Image: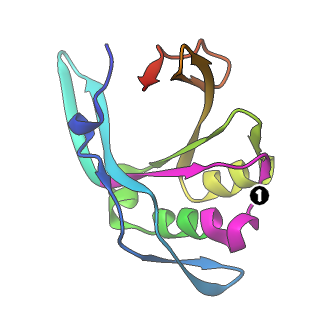
Amino acid sequence: MKTKLSMLNYTNNSKKIQGIYKDRPRDTIPDGVFDLVDMQFDGGFKFKTYRGASFAEVKAMDGTLYNSSNQGQIASMLNYMGFSNAVMQAGRGNLMIGTTSDTYIAPSLYKHAVKMNVNIVHYRAYYRMISGAMHIRFQYKWTDTTDSVILK
């Protein structure tokens, strides 16, 4: 079953949030905000939605993302999420990071996310040109890539 972002109340975001980086306020703007949906089975499926407990961020870079990358942007986002009502009510949050295929996330960033009860979900984008159209696929960890999205 494929999940549609519209089912998760995904919205582009232009609202600043105030996180903390190196013990100082650091404003940041996540690229997207959406709901975390918790599914439980207790004789039947139950779904609970936590509005705004998941953020999305896109980074087009090569190399490694660290706590200090982009003047602490992602670290600040994680700090904000860790103390947000939505993440505290859900017991966890998700930060989806979409990057180019040659970008890695430093272990220190994953450790920081764990302290804030946030799960980092890292998607890598791959593309190729076929007959003048760009075919984009995404991969999560070591799974197969998604079906191509075709841009003409």
Q: Position of residue 77 (x, y in %)?
A: 54, 65
Q: Position of residue 29 (x, y in %)?
A: 46, 69
Per the rendered image, the range of residues in magenta is 52-75
Identify the residue shown where x is 77% and y is 36%.
Answer: 102
Q: Toward which corner of the image does residue 47 lie, by quadrant?
A: top left
Identify the residue shown where x is 52% and y is 52%.
Answer: 57
Vertical side of 72 occupied by 12: above or below: above
Q: Quadrant of the N terminus?
A: top left
**Residue found at the very far bottom of the displayed protein:** 24
Q: Toward which corner of the image does residue 84 lie, by quadrant?
A: bottom left
As shown in the figure, which amino acid type bears the numbered disc 1? Tyr
> For mark 1, what is the residue?
66
Residue nearer the viewer, 59 or 25? 59
Residue nearer the viewer, 113 or 134? 134
Q: Is residue 99 left or right of residue 69?
A: left
Identify the residue shown where x is 35% and y is 72%.
Answer: 15
Does dot 1 land on a helix, a strand or a loop?
loop
Q: Magenta stretch: residue 61 in it? A: yes
**Residue found at the very far right of the displayed protein:** 63
Describe the colour scheme in one phrase.
rainbow
Q: Position of residue 120 (x, y in %)?
A: 58, 44
**Number of numbered callouts drawn:** 1
Vertical side of 145 occupied by 15: above or below: below
Q: Is residue 125 left or right of residue 47?
A: right
